[in-house]
């Protein structure tokens, strides 16, 4: 699997690394948060009061599902 924009395979990623134009998923922030609420997208982790991240592995799995 080739991940766009040198997307990391492990670790944590921020929202600006996930969503276009910098990230591989071409949707808006509001669509992303609605997808989390609906269970279509992975839930975030809170590292602090103003730091929200996602596991890179979860995002890579999401990308792989979309390419099948």
Image (cartoon, helix red, strand yellow):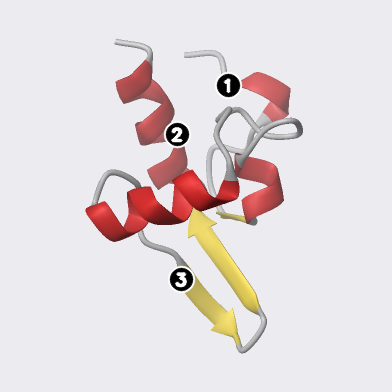
Mark 3 neighbour density, 10 Å: few (under 14) some (14–19) many (20 or more):
few
Instruction: Indicate which disc residue 30 carries.
Output: none
Instruction: Measure how far apart labels 2 and 1 are at the Cα level.
Output: 8 Å
Of the two numbered discs 3 and 1 on the same chain, state the one appearing first in sequence: 1
Instruction: Indicate which disc residue 60 carries.
Output: 2
The residue shown at (24%, 52%) is: 39
Mark 1 neighbour density, 10 Å: few (under 14) some (14–19) many (20 or more):
few
Instruction: Measure how far apart labels 2 and 3 are at the Cα level.
Output: 16 Å
Percent position of residue 37, x then y? 30, 60
Percent position of residue 66, x then y? 36, 20
Q: Indicate left or right for 49 with 5 as reference.
A: left
Q: Secondary structure at mark 3?
A: strand
Callouts 2 and 1 close, C-beta under 8 Å = yes
Percent position of residue 35, x then y? 35, 48
Q: Secondary structure at mark 2?
A: helix
Q: Indicate left or right for 18 with 45 as reference.
A: right
Q: Secondary structure at mark 1?
A: loop
Of the two numbered discs 2 and 3 on the same chain, state the one appearing first in sequence: 3
- Is 15 placed above or below 5 here? below
- Is 8 placed above or below 51 here? above
Q: Is residue 42 visible?
A: no
């Amino acid at each position: 699997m080739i991940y766009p924009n040198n997307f990391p395979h492990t670790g944590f990623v921020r929202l600006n690394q996930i969503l276009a134009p910098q990230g591989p998923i071409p949707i808006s922030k509001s669509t992303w948060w609605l997808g989390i609420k609906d269970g279509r997208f992975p839930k975030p982790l809170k590292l602090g009061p103003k730091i929200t991240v996602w596991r890179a592995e979860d995002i890579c799995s999401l990308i792989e599902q979309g390419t099948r």
